[in-house]
Every structure is written in C-alpha cells, then in structure tokens.
Image (tube, rainbow, N blue to C red):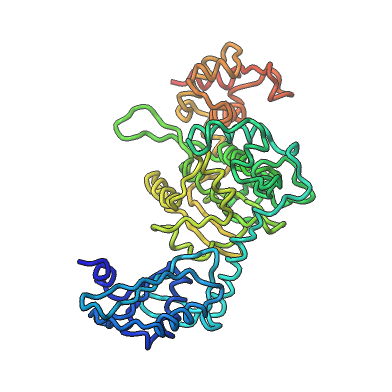
Amino acid sequence: MSDLERLIVGGESETLELKRSTGQLNRAGQTLCGFLNYAGGNVVIGVTDDGRIVGQEVSDKTRRELALMLGRFEPPALVQTRFVELPDGGRKVIVLEAQQQEDARPFMFDGRAYQRVQTTTSVMPQDRYETMLLERAHVRRRWENQAAVDIRLDDFDHEEIFRTREAAIRQHRISAGTSTDVGDILDRLGLRRDGVITQAAQILFGTRFLPDYPQALLKMGRFRGTTITGDILDNRQEHLHAFAAVQEALAFLDRTLPLSAHFPDGQVQREDRLPVPFAALREIILNAVMHRDYSDPGGSVAIAVFDDRIEIRSVGIFPNGITAEALSGPHRSIPRNPLIAETFHRTGAVEIWGRGTNRVIEACVSHGIKSPVFEEKDGAVFVTFFAQIGPLSEMRHQVGTKSALSRHQVQVLEKSRNVSSMKELLVLCGRADRTKFRNQVIRPLLETGLLGMTIPEKPRSSRQRYKTTQAGEQVLAEK
C-alpha cells in the first residue's frame, strides 16, 4: 500500500477531507482553516468522496490558483503542498497538509474563521473565536512571563531556589553543571530572560508580596458543621511563594484532619490514616497552586475543612478544551502557567501527562471513599473530597483511650515517663519527618492532656522536652 493509500484508507475524519478536483478549492481552503483551528489535518485533492483515486492534471494555472488560495489565510498559515504522481504519468493527487500551530490560532480564511467537528467544516461561533483570540494572546503574552514589578534577586528565597536546583539535578531535568548562582539557576529554569526577572519567578520563589502581589495568598479554614456559616475553629491566611504554599497547605491538613485506625487485610498491626488519602490531597493542592489564574489580584488558593468534606478552591476557570467531566478520564495536560508548572515538574513533584486527577480518583476509591467532585463555578475551580471528618470535640475524645492510640503514641507515652526530647522520640519510632510526627503523634497527645511540655510557654524551644502526664499514665495502665 502506498503512502497515499494509507493516508486515505479510513475515509474522511476530523483530520482528513477528500476533494475530487481544484474546482472545490474554496471549500478546501475553508476546511484547511478548520484543521488549523483544531489539531491540523490533510485535504487531499484528486480523490472522490468514496475513496477512489482519480487525480487531475496540474498546470501552471493550477499551481497559481493554489498559491492564491493559500495566501487568503490570516494570520499566514503553514500549509505544506505535495504533488503525488499517479502511475499513468499525467495526473497527480494534491495533498495539502495543515500543521498544528497552537500559538497562532485562530485562523481565518477570506475573513471568516472555520472549525472542524468530526467530518464537517462550519463557520466558527463568535464566542469560540473570541475565546481562541484570548488564548493566543495568553500564549504570547502570559501574566507569568511578564517582568516582575520592583523585584530583585535579593528578594527571593535562595534556599528554596537551591533546593529546586538540587531536586532538578536528581531528576536529570537540569544540567548537573548548573552553577549555584541564583541568577544562573533562574536562567536555566526560564524564569529570567535577558536579565529580566519574570513574574513566574516571583510566584515560585518570592518573599515580599505586598503591595504588588496580593494574589500570592493561601487561605485555610476549619469550620464547625457542614456550612460556611458555621463557627470558625481555625482560620489562617498567609502570603507565600508557590513551594511554601504547597508545604503549608499540606501541613494544615495534616494537623487538622483526624487520624483513624485501620487494620489492613491479613495484618494485626493497626495503620493510622487520614480520612482522605494524603497523596490525593497533595496532587490537588499542587494543581491548585500551579494552574490557578495569577492575573487576578484578588485571587487565592483556599482550603475549607467541614465536618463532612474538604473543599479546595483555586481562582481561574478550566483551560479551553478541559471540562470537569473530562478530568475523570483520559485528557490532555494544558497548563495555564507553563513556566510555573515546568519548574514543579523539574523537581519531580508532578508529571506532565494529564494523569494526576485519574490517580486521585483511583486513590480515593482504593481508600474506600467517594471520588472527588470537580466543578467550575463563580470563576474558580472547586475540588471537593467527601469524607467523615467529624466534630473537633469527637476527634480529640477518641485519643483519650489506649485502644484509640496508635502504636507510636503508646511508645511516646512509655518513653516519656522519663523526660524525652523530640529527637529521641523520632528515633524511637523510626520516623524521619519531624513535622508529620509532631502533627500526627505528638500534637494529639498534647491536646488531650496525655503528654506535657517542660517549657509550655515556648513550644518550639530547642530545649523543649516531653513528659507523660498523670492522665497519660492512667491510659497506659489500661489493659
């Protein structure tokens, strides 16, 4: 089978149109315009609708008509022309290939924009055309690649930049020879261009956000009950760079959500786990921080925890081509902020294949809870995890009995009969993450009065030690 036969064997489609002759050249131009505004495609002239290859004579006049037709696109379009000679030696098939050019869309032909839907070419609706115009402007002049306002290299979190460099080298996504000069690292990451610091760099590594960048805001709240009008049990608002925002959001959820006992099949050791898989929460928070609309000065990422659910909201609508329904199945990855997303990708924090939401759904189902709900409303994207969080008073009461304590909590109470340091307790339990250990093991014991601090007025003191209280001794005495 020849290349031409392989091209047309499946018949007309979203990316293939067949024309008998150049007598249909005007319609061919409209279809090419539809292809250019979609994913590219081929118009084959000299083939009938039923797939018979008939060809046509190609004269100098034919070539001039083709050139004139291809000159009627605005903006100028990249269309390759091939002439395939048929065995009779006198007739040819003309193949016009429209190549995908996302940064130049939308295209017009003779002053009108066209779209391709399945096998039909039609005039593009005005609202669709306007949306594509905005997207074209976004590609060329995005908020993130504009010059940062009154920002210098000294204003950045240098330690975070060095951590990003080291992580990217480990992932083989930046040269191991990249210097430790902050400016050079930003250059390698595409965050500084010709010496000009971009707003993406400010969002990723900035330390000073007011008054020019109020949108670098993370809002976190724990509400009693199931409505936003319930009592606020915890309310925090922080202006942070993107990496710090992810870390703080996860730390907030880690210390806010209750731990419950779970016994995996075939095991006698209990497993303490959150009501929502931590990996799923992490993926959605990363998406919220990376893909939100930073051009809105009133924007933010917000996390609201209720008794029956967790809502994560990021300002900005879905990119064109992505819907809430599409996130539950295979879909393209269309980052709103490519520079910001690519920097996270270089560290190994995320993939670029559009599989994140699918993995979130799988993790929730495996965890035994409902799939999250993805919504676009009021100019923002909402992701809602449904799980029984429970009233705060109930959460704390559960830790007050020995049967409700985790193995590590029992070990901490037993060890702290003699005054113990955080380091000693970490080593005892074989834990490495100090923050998670404090939030998951130590904090519940302190809040329920089972464990005490030797310097309670300075909880973070380097000389802080822990001592099992009389209430803790009573719990340990339970059979």
| Rendered-image quadrant of the N terminus | bottom left
The answer to whether 59 appears left or right of 73 in the picture is left
Residue 256: x percent and y percent?
58, 40
Q: Please, is residue 394 above or below residue 27 in the view?
A: above
In the image, 428 versus 65, the foreground residue is 65
Q: Is residue 236 above or below residue 327?
A: above
- Could you tell me which residue is drawn at 64 percent across and 41 percent down? 186
x then y, percent, for residue 473: 55, 18
Location of residue 269 (image quadrant): top left
Q: Which of the 4 quarters of the picture holds residue 381?
A: bottom right
Q: Is residue 358 above or below residue 58?
A: above
Q: Can residue 346 be seen in this snapshot?
A: yes
Quick one: 107 or 260, which is closer to the camera? 107
Q: Quadrant of the C terminus?
A: top left
Across and down, in percent, residue 162 comes to 62, 32
x then y, percent, for residue 361 = 41, 51
Residue at the extreme top of the image, as rendered: 418
Residue 479 lies, with reference to residue 285, above or below; the image says above
Would residue 393 be visible to someone looking at this image? no
Q: Residue at x 41, y 76 (%)?
A: 117
